[in-house]
Image (spheres, helix red, strand yellow):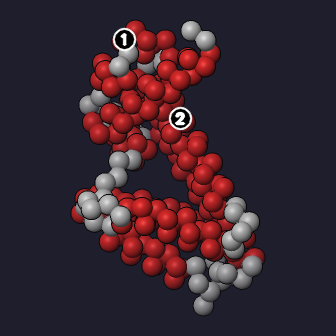
Amino acid sequence: MNSRARIDKRALILAKGAEVMTRRGYHGTGVLEIVQAAGIPKGSFYHYFASKEDFALQALDHLYTPRLARYCRALQDPSRTPRERILAYYGELVAHFARQANPEYHCFIGSLSFEMAELSQPIGQRVEAILQRSVALLADCLEQARAEGEVDVSVDCAALAEFIGNAWEGALMRMKVGRSSTPLSIFLAQLERLLTPH
């Protein structure tokens, strides 16, 4: 098998397996369910992954490296001011969910966090590293906004970035429970107020 085919097969297993694990949970997903979802023999799994834990770690990187890259590009968009970048990014996400009749959100990192962060140190550390990277990107953008007078000069950008990230995750959870995008609309309205200098 050439290297391109190997990469494609590994990506297929990661994508399909992560979907199953997000729905069924870490403990509710076995190697058999992962390979069945990917349509591959069970032996192929161990060609790419040392264990189910190793699969989860690689799946986190596979899913969130490109997502963080997109977040970074959005928050560095030179055509917008720093405040506009943040509001546009979250505004587009809210609009995406608002277009759905019954908004659904399946979060791999959230599912793993609840179930495995305390039970598996490697998974907990990887999840935390991803979340911290997201917060750092937002904090950098907020610092630019502060420098340009778009938010109050007294704002603690690192703390505000943590708060925004946590509030967004909470709004997504409420949307999932209530099958309504209203919590996201409330989040966006409050974010706009937070990012307005007083």
Badge 2: residue crowd in 10 Å (few <14, some 14–19, many ≥20): some
Disc on res. 83:
none
SS at mark 1?
Answer: loop
In percent of width and height, residue 79 lies at 71, 69
* Residue 186 visible in the picture: yes
Residue ID at (43%, 12%)? 44
In percent of width and height, residue 182 lies at 32, 71
Q: Given the image, on which type of amino acid does mark 2 rest?
A: His
Considering every residue shown, the one lying at the far bottom of the view is 198
* Residue 159 visible in the picture: no
Residue ID at (49%, 11%)? 47
Residue ID at (53%, 35%)? 62
Disc on res. 62:
2
The C terminus, quarter of image: bottom right
Residue 39 as seen in the image, left or right of residue 79? left
Measure how far apart labels 2 and 1 are at the Cα level. 21 Å
Numbered label tally: 2
Based on the displayed image, in which of its 4 quarters is residue 187 positioned? bottom left
Q: Given the image, on which type of amino acid does mark 1 rest?
A: Pro
Q: Which residue position holds label 1?
A: 41
Q: Is residue 165 above or below residue 52?
A: below
Based on the displayed image, in which of its 4 quarters is residue 115 positioned? top left
